[in-house]
Amino acid sequence: MPEIALLEETATRPVLDIQGLSISIGGTALLSDITCQLHRGHTLSVVGPSGSGKSTFLRCLNRLEHTSAGTVLLNGVPTDSLPAKQLRSRVGLVSQRFALFGHLNTLSNVTLPLRRVRGMAKPAADELAAVWLERVGLAGLERRRPHELSGGQQQRVAIARAAALEPDVLLLDEVTSALDPELVDEVENVILELGAAGTTLIVVTHDIPFAAKVGDTMMMLERGKVVEYGTAREVRHRHADEPLMTPAASVAVRHGLAYYQAAVSFVAEPAGAPGPMIADVPDKRGLARDAEHADASSGVRSLRRGLEVLQAIADAGGEASLRELSKRLQLAESTVHGLLHTLVLSGHVVRTSERRYGLGHALIQLGEATNRKLGVQATAALQLVAALTGENADLAVLEGADAVYIAQAVMPGSTRSAREVERRLPARATAAGRALLSQLTPSELTVFIQRQLPRANPLPQQLVTELAHVRRRGYASETDEVEPGISCVAVPVAAGPVPLALTVTGPSDRLTAERMPALAPHLRRVGEQLASDLRRSLQP
């Protein structure tokens, strides 16, 4: 029977069929040849370091990003043939920023898309929204506004809002990354219940254990390419002892380490502390106090050395041997080995191979928290720059051989650019990258070239000349170098343990060679204030 054949075909056909998905902007490949299939009720976990293309992959699936090649079929229908509004009602997206309307209560946040997208009458929308709020454990909180909810509750409202539309596929983008650990379980349980109820899910996360819990299969991305694909259990087993960080330690971890190093220095040498007092005749109490002081000093010294080990691993690109660390720290190998043993037990360091060590999972939470703090601190500065210039403003950091964009203020109606949060662009080829590299000392620059650009060794005079020019005039600029029709001006921000750069990006017909030098003093003033604020944040 034709009807039976059609039902069988529908039952075996994947809900989502992705073949050769690729996207590039201005010659920079953001995703390369992504291929996978999802059937009804299947959950795919997508993992990878910051900037690997995870969020870009999700945005391509509901056409928030335009792909360069490949096809995406939704129940056998090409998604590029569907109107955007219809596609996005069938492929829902929940971001880590909740995106709730602050002036609406919980119930209204969920009913709004039901009425606007599905065209439901208010009574029916209210009834369905109440059902979904109960499913995510928020019954009784319908009248509360977002500011009256915890982060975990807000994220569950966002999930209920997307799921109430009953999409064919639900995309969850780092929905636990902004939550405290005790709130992660709340969201995790909701995701597991949705999967058990037959919802098809794609979950993006940096957390391999979490990905393995909620996923049936796992896909690992690195620099926009699939480097591993298999069942969640298999992938987790192969990577159980690996830190999910970029090869070069992230700016967040470095800032976090700097904060704790400053705190340790404060404990060891508090401002205005009196010098040691020597009694003429020591008594038992005095001896006890001396012993206690010696124990405290020893503990502080061990803590400081442990932090120095972590910093040395970060400076080495996220992984180093025992011998390399001993040489870098100028400590005996036995001393470094003892410190590493303690750090491995605490999860701050992992042993990646024979006598090689990398940064561990316990640092990810520190890095994420510090990165959020850095982003919040930078937001006001970026918004001020965007208002002053009328163009997009970004904050970039140096990571490996790349300039990585970590925060942004976007002007309404701005030109689409490759410079978005978590995007990576070659440092040498960008204004942001040259502003970052200009802050390195000659020895640091030599090390950078040797490690990151080995083909350019010995140190190329052209790069030295370019960076000297940036230092003299106080800014770097580019026109059409990375993207046709796009210009960028960047100023260095010397704010702490790693270089930062404040940038403005816009169309070349607005951001002209004549205008960029006039904007640079404004950027420098904002950058200096931002640097001052960030330096203060590193004080205990």
Image (cartoon, rainbow, N blue to C red):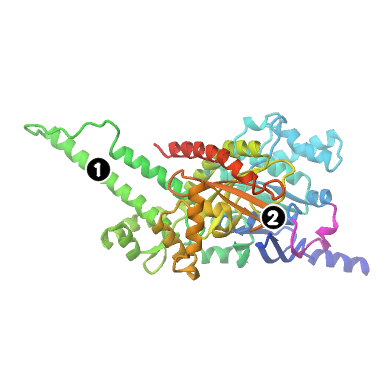
Q: Nearer the viewer, residue 450 or 12?
A: 450
Q: Quadrant of residue 313?
A: bottom left
485 with respect to 433 (left or right): right
Q: Give the SS element for disc 2.
A: helix
Amino acid type of the residue that numbered disc 2 sits on in the rendered structure: Leu
Amino acid type of the residue that numbered disc 1 sits on in the rendered structure: Ser
Residue marked by disc 2: 58
Q: Nearer the viewer, residue 21 or 39?
A: 21
Q: Give the SS element for disc 1.
A: helix
Query: Which residue is found at the position 48% from the left and 52% from the top?
Result: 438
Query: Which residue is found at the position 46% from the left and 37% from the top?
Result: 532
Task: State how far apart marks 2 and 1 are (Cα).
Answer: 51 Å
163 with respect to 147 (left or right): right
In the rendered image, residue 65, in percent from the top left (x then y), is placed at: 73, 54
Residue marked by disc 1: 297
Question: Could you tell me if residue 43 is visible in this image?
Answer: yes
1 with respect to 410 (left or right): right
Task: Classify mark 1: residues with Cα within 10 Å, few (<14), some (14-19) or many (20+).
Answer: some
In the rendered image, residue 193, in percent from the top left (x then y), is placed at: 67, 50
Question: Could you tell me if residue 243 is visible in this image?
Answer: no
Residue 69 within the magenta-colored segment of the rendering: yes
The range drawn in magenta is 66-83
